[in-house]
């Protein structure tokens, strides 16, 4: 497992958490929710790319 992947996901999580707190304290709960959802989508894209690479590796290993 690549350690950079963990740092990328953690970085997105920290940024989203800080933005969420700032927006919530400013009274913009809707934007805070949208920021959280956007962060979740970004992390899902990162994980989806890694799963695609895993499937292609398995496919090449077993000559499928």
Image (spheres, helix red, strand yellow):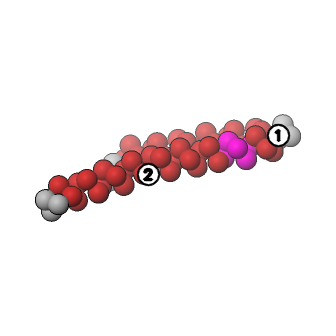
- Secondary structure mostly seen in magenta is helix
**Distance from label 1 to label 2 (Cα)?**
29 Å
SS for tag 2? Answer: helix
Relative horizontal placement of residue 16, taking residue 11 as reference (left or right): right
Q: Is residue 3 magenta?
A: no
Residue at x 47% of width, y 46% of height:
45
Q: Which residues, given as a range, are shown in magenta?
A: 32-36
Q: Residue furthest front?
A: 64
Q: Which percent across, then down, holds residue 23?
A: 77, 39
* Position in image of residue 61 (x %, y %): 15, 58
Residue 28 marker: 1
Q: Quadrant of residue 57?
A: bottom left
Assess whether mark 2 and mark 1 are in contact (beta carbons under 8 angstroms). no
Q: Residues within 10 Å of mark 1 (few under 14, many from 20)?
A: few
Query: What residue is shown with label 2?
Result: 47
The residue carrying pointer 2 sits among few (fewer than 14), some (14 to 19) or many (20 or more) residues within 10 Å by Cα, namely some
């Amino acid at each position: 497992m690549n350690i950079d992947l963990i740092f990328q996901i953690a970085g997105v999580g920290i940024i989203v958490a800080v933005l969420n707190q700032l927006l919530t304290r400013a009274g913009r709960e809707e934007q805070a929710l949208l920021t959280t959802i956007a962060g979740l989508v970004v992390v899902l894209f990162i994980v989806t790319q890694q799963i695609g690479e895993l499937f292609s590796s398995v496919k090449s290993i077993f000559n499928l």
